[in-house]
Amino acid sequence: MKRMYTKDVPRKAGEKVKVAGWVRSIRDLGRLKFIILADREGKIQITARKEECDETLMDILDHLTKESVIVVEGRIELNKQAPGGREILPEKVTLLSKAERIPLDVTGRTKADLSTRLDQRVLDLRRPENLAIFKIQSKLVEGMERWLDSNGYLKTFTPCIMANASEGGAEVFPVIYYEREAFLRQDPQLHRQLLMAAGFEKIYDLGPSWRAEKSHTIRHLSEHRGCAVELSFIKDETDTMRVEEEIVISAIKAVKKECKEELELLGKDVKVPKKPFPELRFPKVYDILKKLGKEVEYGGDIDRESETLLWKYVQKKYKSDFFFLNRFPFDIKPFYVMRVDEEPQWARSVDLVFKGIELSSGGQREHRYEKIIHQAKAKNLNLENLKWFTEHFRYGAPPHGGFNLGIERLTMQLLDIPNIREAVLFPRTPERLLP
Ligand code: ATP
Ligand code: MG
């Protein structure tokens, strides 16, 4: 007989079924035994009546431990009190894996702190609320890919090991590459740009990036993933913003429509944002912040508090949890961004902010060789080290732009998860490299 998910067990009395999963709880009333069996898609009650079970079966049931993995074959019986209105009367139970005394309460009734939970992440992930987060994350990515695939974007895989540190020095992890030193990428950015020079026109890359900054914030991981998109023949950075909106909307729509049970379990109601998302531009941002009581140096970067203030401002004014920040000062952005030709202090550099936290950075890139070199010089970069990247812009590169949208950040903000460590399966942080 084929095994089925517990949620698919029909309300058909007498039908024979086979299910498998984890023993979530055991209740022993002497002559009656209730077992809750959980699998990825739900749970079901197994009810064993002593007088109806043979000795071998009873022996297995008597020695069951919580979280052991079993296969149950039996007949369906209707029971209003059981979850889903039906239960299984077991005829055969096979123990596949016996669990020892578990170090973490999988039901979540006994609370454990985050660090203990992350030490026991495998057990922690068995909690339905955690599984729900990752079903939603999977759906978010599916929603993004759906839009990208149906709009002609190629799924690409760019390298993670780099010969040079792409953006800055301190935040990059060195690796031993045969006899040489190499680095883990901080962003797939540069190779995405090269694919534009290669004529790929519209691409995306769903891959990891690494940041060696010793951050201990609720929004930084040492390893994170992004939906990184790049497109050619844009008129300016606003074209990338329009694409980004579509992707975000497609992702959230997919969740809203196809993750109803998960959202209910988490007690969340998500709103599909309206397009276009509001846009705030530098240097006007400084004036807005000043009016909100926050003094930021003209030409300087804005901090977390500013992002939150701007979110509240946008929420009030435009009723939106999303907004773009555009035209960042060139001084605080990497060499490859495109500056506004007539106002070179400002770059066509865009962040997307969701509920006060940065979700992505991107915008239009500089595709004109001379300007790229000029800007790299202005940032005091070693031109020789950058040649592997810059030289390809000598042989024909279209105007292009893109962004990298953090997948854990999107998950975290959408579901109001207080710490990004809970929006990633196995977090990598300065202190944590296990499990
Ligand atoms: P922040 O200012 O919030 O530290 P950043 O500007 O350094 O972010 P970018 O280089 O712009 O980050 O990376 C693009 C996107 O990737 C970010 O907007 C964010 O969604 C995500 N991201 C970047 N760094 C991290 C990190 N350490 N942990 C989790 N997500 C990250
Ligand atoms: Mg950024």
Image (cartoon, rainbow, N blue to C red):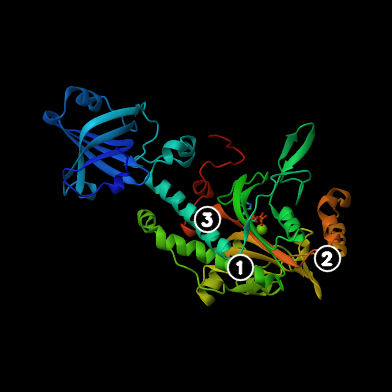
Q: Which label sits on residue 141?
A: 3
Q: Nearer the viewer, residue 69 or 374?
A: 69
Q: What residue type is disc 3 on?
A: Val
Q: Earlier in the sequence, mark 2 or mark 3?
A: 3
Q: Earlier in the sequence, mark 3 or mark 1?
A: 3
Instruction: Confirm or reject: label 2 Cβ below 8 Å from ligand 1.
Output: no
CB under 8 Å between callouts 3 and 1? no
Residue 203: give x, y in percent of width and height: 65, 59
- Residue wearing tag 2: 368
Q: What residue type is disc 2 on?
A: Arg
In the visual, does 224 lie left or right of 381? left
Position of 262 relative to 46 (above/below): below
C-alpha gap between disc 2 and disc 3: 33 Å
Residue drawn where x is 40% and y is 31% of the image: 103
Residue drawn where x is 83% and y is 65% of the image: 368
**Can residue 171 be seen at all in this image of the molecule?**
yes
Q: Earlier in the sequence, mark 2 or mark 1?
A: 1
State the SS at label 1. helix
- Residue wearing tag 1: 243
Q: Residues within 10 Å of mark 1 (few under 14, many from 20)?
A: some
Q: Nearer the viewer, residue 346 or 236?
A: 236
State the SS at label 2. loop
Position of 310 relative to 116 (above/below): below
Residue furthest to the left in view is 51
C-alpha gap between disc 2 and disc 1: 23 Å
**Can residue 290 be seen at all in this image of the molecule?**
no
Residue 327 quadrant: bottom right
Q: Quadrant of ligand 2?
A: bottom right
